Image (cartoon, rainbow, N blue to C red):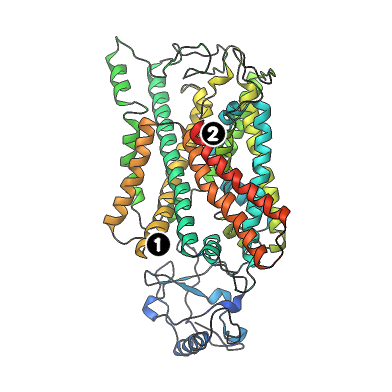
Amino acid sequence: MANMAGDSSHLISEVDPELHPGPMNIQFDSSDLRSKRPFYIEPTNIVNVNDVIQRVSDHASAMNKRIHYYSRLSTPADKALIAPDHVVPAPEECYVYSPLGSAYKLQSYSEGHGKNTSLVTIFMIWNTMMGTSILSIPWGIKQAGFTTGMCVIMLMGVLTLYCCYRVVKSRTMISSLDTTTWEYPDVCRHYFGSFGQWSSLIFSLVSLIGAMIVYWVLMSNFLFNTGKFIFNFIHHINDTDTLLRTNSSDPVICPSAGSGDHPDNSSVIFYVNDTEVQQFEKWWNKSKTVPFYLIGLLLPLLNFKSPSFFSKFNILGTVSVLYLIFLVTLKAIRLGFHLEFHWFVSTDYFVPEIRFQFPQLTGVLTLAFFIHNCIITLLKNNKNQENNVRDLCIAYMLVTLTYLYIGALVFASFPSPPLSKDCIEQNFLDNFPSSDTLSFIARMFLLFQMMTVYPLLGYLARVQLLGHIFGDVYPSIFHVLILNLIVVGAGVSMACFYPNIGGIIRYSGAACGLAFVFIYPSLIYIISLQQEERLTWPKLIFHIFIIILGLANLIVQFFM
């Protein structure tokens, strides 16, 4: 699998080029092509995505055995016996070995040699951070107060950006080893040993499983409202008659009582004289039946060995966010702005500008700005590596502006009076009735997008947990089924007994953020400076303060 400079013969015999590259193609990154260690692969184990068997020539086999022998004579950090350029395969001729017994052709080859421009990189970071947290931003602003909420979003954006910058620079602080192919868990393992490896795994699983639970709660919500919209449309039923609502052409509802004197209205309407409607309400219940219906849809998808099919629908996430921005803008234009500023005292319809529940917003924002565990991977494919920090800053600025835009418009346009600002729900779409057509489209978009992303999250959880414990991401259908039943059971339980996505997001965000956002980046920076004898008291105090903020952010969530 190596080639000699100037040779006219190919080491791997010719096959038809891949006209339709498929999902099996693996993305590989390394900033130094000379760091590759080619190795011999049995001819029957080399396949491409079209299952065309490729033969390895005797010359290639001999050359790879020679390179493999020399690479064993020294440690990987010692470059004295590294294979010279003229015997290392060209990038387009490189393959990577899979534990499943196959070798897959590479598409992108090296860090800094990727094809992603700065614009694409910025958009990828923005798209990756835009998740379910955006639905709870208006609720978080309501909990903190409008002025306090705006300030907290900007401050959390700056703080998480700095911690993310420290993550990006963490590999460069290790000068004694070649870290070009490392990910952030590798850096944690270097500084903290097996504790760093396993603790990073645990906190990563917390973020994944927390996201899967939030997805299940939201999918139950969206499926319930979608079915209710269709049923009411067919039977010409107005389901907002008994709800506290506005009387405008764009009704806004208060499905649950706020902190005012409003009664606790339920979103479920019973029609005593209509047996058909009673049966529908019995079998189509948001917390008692719909979460269980999702099991039949999603549990089989979680057991797939490869999630590559679902990755084709990633664009739906972007479409959903853009549609939410359109929806919020249109609603704000129609409803107008309703603001009054009372700094410390609440009124019947408005909340004070400063509220002591603002840590609930910081917990939500920790997850909303969380990208620290995969930022190194995203930036590796940036064509211009020198622009990484600039692109990261621009992406965080765009994310912050998006959250500010969504949060400010929903909060400001919420019609007060007649409704109190305390009626803003943890999922702001719940403030629009199921009969609202624009909200129905938004729920349909989000439902389909989440049903395609959920198996991807399940696959990542499987890779991290089963891969570390058994050394195989699919040890057996029994192991995978047990793991999936546990994860699905957690989602169903939360959807039935604690369907509060704001609470779930802030708890899981504060927990995983404690490690990846606050503690690890700061501790690694302190240790690296200490090793280089460049640690100063101001830097030490500042980064210890960041760690204390992370601890306080987690602890205070249990007292809100």
Answer with the quarter of the image where residue 155 lies.
top right
Check whether the beta carbons of the residues at disc 1 and disc 2 lie within 8 A of each other: no
Q: Is residue 82 above or below residue 386?
A: below
Question: Which residue sits at x=59%, y=26%?
Answer: 142
The residue wearing badge 1 is 468
Report the Cα–Cα distance between label 1 and label 2.
Answer: 33 Å
Q: Amino acid at mark 2?
A: Leu
Identify which residue, 194 or 26, lies in the foreground. Answer: 194
Q: Is residue 401 visible?
A: no
Q: Does 406 sit left or right of 65 as displayed?
A: right
Q: Position of residue 495 (x, y in %)?
A: 38, 33
Identify which residue, 21 or 505, lies in the foreground. Answer: 505
Q: Does 89 sit left or right of 353 as displayed?
A: left
Q: Position of residue 344 (x, y in %)?
A: 66, 20
Q: Position of residue 368 (x, y in %)?
A: 57, 42
Secondary structure found at label 2: helix
Q: Is residue 418 visible?
A: yes
Answer with the quarter of the image where residue 470 lies.
bottom left
Q: Position of residue 551 (x, y in %)?
A: 55, 44
Q: Which mark is residue 383?
A: none
Q: Amino acid at mark 1?
A: His
Q: Does 166 sit left or right of 429 as displayed?
A: right
The residue wearing badge 2 is 135
Question: Which residue sits at x=54%, y=79%?
Answer: 76
Secondary structure found at label 1: helix
Q: How many marks?
A: 2
